[in-house]
Amino acid sequence: MAEIEHPLQGTVGEPPEPGKLNSSPPLRLSQGHLSLLSTCPRKFQHTYLEQLASPTTPEQLERLAAGSQFHLLMQQWQLELPIEPFVEEDTQLQCWFSSFRDAASQILMLDEPDGSVLRQSEYALTIEFQGYLLTVVYDLLISNPAQAKILDWKTYPRPQNPRWLLQNWQTRLYLFVLAETGSYFPEQISMTYWFFQAEGRESEAAQQFTVTNDSARHQETRRDLTHLLTQLTDWLARYRAGEPFPQIPLGSDRCDSCSYTIRCDRAPSLAAEHEPAQNKHSCFKDFTLPNLADIQEIPL
Ligand code: SF4
């Protein structure tokens, strides 16, 4: 019997050669950039275009380092390399990994376990879309000819209400890019977040949240991406002409926790003094904020 070719064999995460799309190299955008752009275009300008460093607390640095270690550990495990040097003296890593190992058979299972199964960790894909390079990196991609399952590791507890993950740009972009490669129909692709940090109880098992995909969701993401990137193209053109990116409306509580409040003249005491009528003069136009209030900041 002829062997069925695996849809992802021969698919590589290589981007189109920069410079081919237009005369200047295209911007490379990750889910973090899209989240930033949706949250506040001016913040995108400061962070991405001007590369202004945002202060990071020692606690944040520690959390980021621990998360990176866990991702390295999982890569090590996937490559069947020794993991002991990683976990030996780190009880937190040990806990997370043991939580993974206890649920591994469920985590690594495909719904339709037929044909050759590929498991690829830190799998990168890039597609060109509207003159931008959209880039994703899957923590683990498990696939066979019938389906592809994107897995993402989280080292914090599962949120009480994880439904905001449905609208999160990580979920949307990760599902979209894989479907756009043409390897699978949207209905064949799903994404599962795994949360390895127990909340309160030591013995709590790993928790998950799965998002299934379909053509309607795919088209909705295409529509929203097209809209956002059309806005970005316009903002970039204006920015080159000396006009800054739009700010979010005055009075938004997002400004209170933003590291650019002073630069933006949005310190709480200053914002309170402004009359709402001044919003009319804001350069913020036709910009709708998705429900991202609970999404933790994604480091760029
Ligand atoms: S202070 Fe407000 S307007 Fe300025 S970058 Fe931060 S969120 Fe945007």
Image: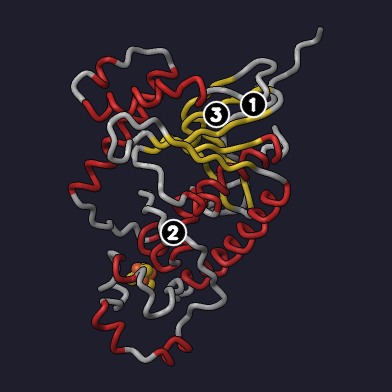
Residue where numbered disc 3 is placed: 141
Q: Residues within 10 Å of mark 3 (few under 14, many from 20)?
A: many
Look at label 1 and name its amino acid: Asp
Nearer-N-terminus badge (3/1): 1
Residue 49 position in % (x across, y down)? 40, 59
Nearer-N-terminus badge (1/2): 2
Quarter of the view holding residue 293: bottom left
Q: Quadrant of the N terminus?
A: top right
**Residue depicted at 51% across the width and 73% down the height:** 238
141 displayed left or right of 43 = right
| Secondary element at image label 2 | helix
Look at label 2 and name its amino acid: Leu
| Secondary element at image label 3 | strand
Look at label 3 and name its amino acid: Leu
Residue where numbered disc 1 is placed: 111
Closer to us: 123 or 164: 164
Q: Is residue 211 above or below residue 219?
A: above
Q: Is residue 268 above or below residue 89?
A: below
268 displayed left or right of 223 = left
Residue 41 position in % (x across, y down)? 45, 67
Q: Taking the image as drawn, is residue 188 in sight?
A: yes
Q: Quadrant of ligand 1?
A: bottom left
Note whether ligand 1 is within 8 Å of mark 3. no
Residue 262 position in % (x across, y down)? 25, 73
**Residue depicted at 39% across the width and 64% down the height:** 43
